[in-house]
Image (cartoon, coloured by chain):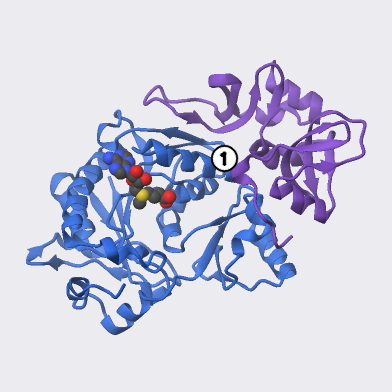
Chain colours: A blue, B purple
Amino acid sequence: MPIPKPFRERYKDIVDDPDLFFECIEKLVPKSFRVNTIKSSSNEVKENFEGYGINIKQMPWYSDAFVSDEPNVGSVFEHFLGKIYLQELVSMLPPLVIKNELGDYVLDACAAPGSKTTELAAMMENKGTLIANDISYSRIKALKFNLEKVGALNTLITNQDLRFFPSSLFDSILLDAPCSSEGTVRKNSKLFNIWNEKQIHGHSNLQKQLIVKAFDLLKPGGVMVYSTCTFAPEENEAVVDHLLQKREAKLEKIELPNFKLSPGLLQWHGREYDPQIELVSRVWPHHNDTGGFFLAKVRK
Amino acid sequence: MNVLKYFAERFGIPESLFDEFGIYAGPKGRVYLGPKKLPDKPDIVSPGLLIARAESAVKPTTNFLQLFGKHATKNIISLSKEQAVSYAKGEDLRIPSENEGYVIVEYSGNFLGCGMLKSGILINQIPKAKRQLVKYI
Ligand SMILES: C[S@@+](CC[C@H](N)C(=O)[O-])C[C@H]1O[C@@H](n2cnc3c(N)ncnc32)[C@H](O)[C@@H]1O
C-alpha cells in the first residue's frame, strides 16, 4: 500500500526532510531486542551472540538495547529463557527517560502487552511496587505471560478503565496511550489500509481524559511520561497542551545522549500551543532508523 | 502445604530468599510471589509471579524455576545441548534415573524450567505457549 496522499499532505511541512522521511517509513524497521537485566546482562548476551556468530549492535544511547540483522533473533536460547525481550527501539524510550526518577510506587497506566512494564520492572531491580493496568482483559493475558516470562516479582496487574482508577499517589507514571499508531508503519505495512484522519480525533479526545486523570494520580513532585507511537499533533502536542490548560503541570526537557530528538510543534492547523510545548520530544524515523514516536515528560 | 518449605526441602532453595516478598494464594491452588504489601484498591488480577500450583501436591512453575533455579542444590537434571533443544521444543526425554517427582531442568548453567521424572522419563512441563524452536544455543 503506497503512502496515502492526505498522510503526505499532513506531515510534509512539519518534518525536516520530507523525502528522507517518506522513503524511510516504507522500509522495514531493524530487528531489535532489550536485555532483561532481571535474568541476564548485556555482557552475557554479547558474549553468547558472538559464540553463535550473530551480529548485533549495541545502541550508544542505551547499553541494554541491541539491533540485529539476523531475522531469527527470536530463536536464540536466550529468548526461550527470558533473558532477552524482543522490542522496538522506540518502545524502550519512555521508561529510559525517567529511569533514575522512578521511585518505588509506579503506575504503568496502559500496560498491555507489557513491553514497557517488563522494562520498568527490570529498572526497578524487581523491587518496590509496579502497578500494570489495562482496560482490556484479553490483552491482560499477554501482559501476564510477558511479565512471568521476564521474572517480574514487583508487578501487580489491574484491569481498570484508567478514567475510573481509584485515587492513589504514585511516585511516577507511564501513560503510553492508545493511539493511531502511525509510527509503527515500518513494522506493519498494512497500517495505511485502515489509516484515516477521522480516527485521530477519536483518539485525541480519550487521550485528553487519560492524561488529566494520570496527572491526578501523581504525588506532588512526581514525574510522568506521556507517550504515543504516532505523528499526529492532535494526539501529541494538543493532548499535552490540554493538560497544561487544565492543571498546574510543568514540562521538562528530555535528555538522551546519542539519540536524536526533535522539539514539539508550537502550532498545528491554526491552533497555537503553550510555549512550554517546545520541551516535548518527537522521534522521526529517519533520524535514528527507528519507528516514529512522541514523548513528554511532565512534573507535578 | 507451605510452598516455600517445599522448595527448601525438595530443591534446597533457601526460604530466607523470600523474606522481602509476600506470598499470596489465588484460585485453584495458585500461589504467587509478589511485593510484601498490596494496596487495598483497586482489585488485583494477579500479584507478582505465579510460583506454584498447590492442590494435592505442589507443582512449581517453569517461570519460578527459571528465576530461582540457580539457588537450588538438589533434584536438578542436567541435559546435553541436543536434549536442551528438544526439551525447549516440548519433547519428553528418556533419562535413566531412579529419581521420581518434580525436578529442575538445567543446561550449562541455564535453567530451562520444570520437569517431572517418572520411570526413567522426563515428562515435559514447559507450558505450551513457552515452547519454541531454539536454533542457537
Ligand atoms: C499503546 S498500547 C500500550 C502498549 C504497552 N504500553 C506496551 O509497551 O506493551 C495502549 C493500551 O491502552 C489500553 N487502553 C485503552 N483505553 C484505556 C483506558 N481507558 N484505560 C486503561 N487502558 C486503556 C489498550 O487496551 C492498550 O493495551
Residue A235 in view, yes or no: yes
Q: Is residue A17 left or right of residue A143?
A: left
Return the chain for callout 1: A
Residue receiving disc 1: A148
Please state which of residues A271 and A178 is positioned toward the viewer in this rendering: A178
Quarter the C terminus of chain A occupies: top left
Q: Is mark 1 within 8 Å of ligand 1?
A: no
Q: Nearer the viewer, residue A204 or A252?
A: A204
Q: Quadrant of residue B40?
A: top left
Relative height, residue B135 to residue A170 (above, below): below
Q: Please give left or right for residue A55 compared with residue A86 in the image.
A: right
Residue closer to the observer: A22 or A236: A22
Q: Residue at x 47, y 38 (%)?
A: A141
Q: Position of residue A63 (x, y in %)?
A: 56, 64
Q: Quadrant of the N terminus of chain A?
A: bottom left
In the image, A197: left or right of B124? left
Tell me what residue is drawn at x 24 percent, y 66 percent: A264
Label 1 neighbour load within 10 Å: few <14, some 14-19, many 20+: many
Above or below A224: residue A198: below
Q: Secondary structure at mark 1?
A: helix
Amino acid, disc 1: Glu
**Residue A270 placed where, x, y %?**
6, 66
Residue A278 image position (x, y, % from top left): 22, 65
Which quadrant of the figure has residue B56? top right
- Residue sitting at the far left: A270
Measuring from the top left, give residue A262's x and y in whole percent.
30, 71
Mark yes or no: residue A175 visible.
Answer: no
Query: Which image quadrant shows ligand 1?
Result: top left
Q: Residue at x 39, y 67 (%)?
A: A291
Q: Is residue A107 depicted above or below B13 in this figure?
A: below
Residue drawn at x 85%, y 34% as measured from the top left: B74
